Amino acid sequence: MRPVYLIGASQTPVAEHWNRSLEELAGAALYGALGDAGQPAIQALYVANALGGLLNKQAQLGAHLLAATGLSAIEGYSIEAAGASGGVALRQAFLAVASGVYQCVAVVGVEKVTDVLENELNVALATSLDAIAEADQGLTLAAGWALLQQRYGYEYGYDASSFAPWPVAAHANAIHNPNALYRFPLNPAKVATAAPVATPIGLLDSSTVADGAAAVIIAAAPSRGGDGARAPIRIAGSALASVALALGARPDPLWLDAAARSAGAALTAAQVNVEAVNVAELSDQHGIVAALSLEAAGFAPRGTAPRLAADGTYAQGGRLPMATAGGCKARGDTVGALGVYQIVELAAQLWGEAGPLQVPGARVALAQCLGGLGATAATHILVKE
Amino acid sequence: MAVTRTGTGIVGYGAYIPRFRIADSEIARVWAGGGSGPVQAKAVAGTDEDTITMAIEAARNALRRAKLDGAQLGTVWIGSESHPYSVKPSGTLVAEALGCRPAVHAADWEFACKAGTEALTAGMGMVSSGLVEYALAVGADTAQGRPGDALEYTAAAGAAAVIIGSAAEALATIDATVSYVTDTPDFFRRADRPYPVHGNRFTGEPAYFHHIEAAATELLHEIGAEPGDFRYLVLHQPNAKFPQVAAKQLGFRTEQVAPGLLAPRIGNTYSAAALLGLCATLDITEAGERILLVSYGSGAGADAYALTATKYLGQARDRAPQTSVYLAREQSIDYASYARMRGKYKLG
């Protein structure tokens, strides 16, 4: 396999885009990324999208977006792995370039969720669970994570307030992100008294699903950007793993095994230790998701993530800043596009273009996104050269 | 395009609010185990009340203030989204009850919560064209909210009537009006459905706020006026918060909105909401003072009106019960009584 580089990135704001279609959002991000990369010719388009067929009643997003963006001469298709779609699509791009089949390809993640009422959205989101064992019984994603948080609290002695550092830090970061859905601070007391969503998870420890698109350009040759000021970013590790969808089918539900295996494989491929990672984007729809992801990736011993979070480990200025642009909680959860947003945000960190959100000296970044309750996990390691 | 120099005005106005109130905390007790809602309480129509009976009450008050007889009315137009019949006009029944001659225009209007003001604008056209001397426009609703739905906390009952006549004899002249509509499906009810569907947060920024602000801004621009030129602002009020936020965004002060803000005490009276706010405001407006009225109807549109009170308003306001009388005449009911009055129990 040959080296693979990230040479362009772009995103739309995460928002309730009442007046912008799925096609418009995807096109804006894609053209933005192509412009950022200096208008290279791309040979394939990988579309990350989780809910288009269910909510937008639109399949074949590859062909559809290629036609809509005037790129119909190349190959393109959509990739669905619920909340992991973005990472899985990036892996397709990585494989295509690493294998030598293509020189330059694009990944666009897009999700348009605000054209339907909440009930329809919740039913669609629950399709990432095991339909027969879980969703048909009434389980939702939030309820699934709530069950895990309840068990985690019982095993390790935490209560709901132990998970507040994640939403609080995410909101503190998002104030500086003009693309974020929520740009206001949260305090722990407000998080603790918010209305319940799925006990013990409250409203202010729950991310909001919103519209948005993000795109990256992946190439075999590094680029220093239009003005030559950018350090090349190499995708040093890419790995995908999965486990059973249903929590009840997992021997140790509090251990996100797919997340652990994909992180381990990506770090090994990149030949970096977990300690070398300077900044991370993880699935953090609720504090418990961040906690379990951090422990699975090896950033924290089991049962310790909330304690480390309370010490500011994952906030700006901490040992491992995460959700530096607001994460799912404050930037907004764009479901199938999430994994691509993570890469766009981490590229800004490695290029030193993150402004007030910049993690000083960031050189190695880890991105991981999860599908459903962690059944699919895609992890990528980005290294600044 | 704004319509200016209308030559018309409001020669009579009247409010009606049913006496029953259910507190939001009582609804929350049943459906959420406690808590509160977007208003303190909402007005509930009694078992013998509906859009027609309330429209008659409000219209009679408007006739008293106008010192008119029902036989002098040229139109009887009822705006509502809760007409008792899908097919069979409310207007004819109201017209007979008011003592109108059969040679009168009677019909029902529908545009979600702004059906009443659309009837008002049409009445202005009838009067200014000389087709009729006096036009009655009523906004009345017994609004529907599915039990347990967010709408149930605000969907209320009430009616407000205005009689449009020549500006020369008006209690308040209508100086200009503008209507602003787009196809925005924020809230709707299909013909065969008992309860409406609403788009939650979509009902806010792209719907209520956009249309209210667009209509108001267009009107102010057309007549060269500023918020400070008006003594009062009356907005459609689906809850307590929306009109206050919209007023602030338009540059109005809290005290300009307060007299016409009834939603906290009676909920969202739908087609009656903006016009009831206008009634309450006319009850205290002095001659020469100006009022900006903006209604809103889902689907969506807003009608904005600039009005100026005349010297006749002061002597007319006590010819019928003021809005404050209806507000004060409140009788609290529990959820069980509310469910009975609103026909929520399925019998047999």
Image (cartoon, coloured by chain):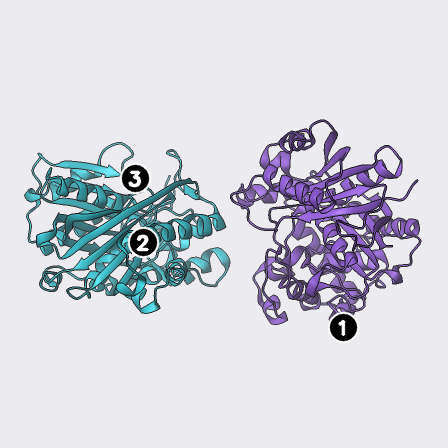
SS at badge 2: helix
Q: Which residue is nearer to you in this view: B224 or A134?
A: B224
- Per the model, the C-alpha gap separating discs 3 and 2 is 28 Å
Mark 3, residue position: B110
What residue is at 31 percent from the left and 69 percent from the top? B255
Read off the residue under disc 1.
A311
Kindly indicate the quadrant of the structure image that contains residue A286: bottom right
**In the rendered image, residues at marks 1 and 3 fall on the same chain:** no
Are dots 2 and 1 in contact, CB under 8 Å? no
Residue B53 left/right relative to A262: left
Taking depth in this image into account, of A112 and A197 the one nearest to the observer is A112
Q: In the rendered view, tell whether residue A274 sits above or below residue A4.
A: below
Q: Distance between the residues labelled 2 and 1?
A: 55 Å
Q: Which of B288 and B12 is in front in this view?
A: B288
Q: Of the residues shown, which amino acid type is indicated by label 3?
A: Glu
Palette colour of chain A: purple
Percent across and percent down for residue B230 are 26, 63
* Residue occupying the point 76% across, 35% down: A42
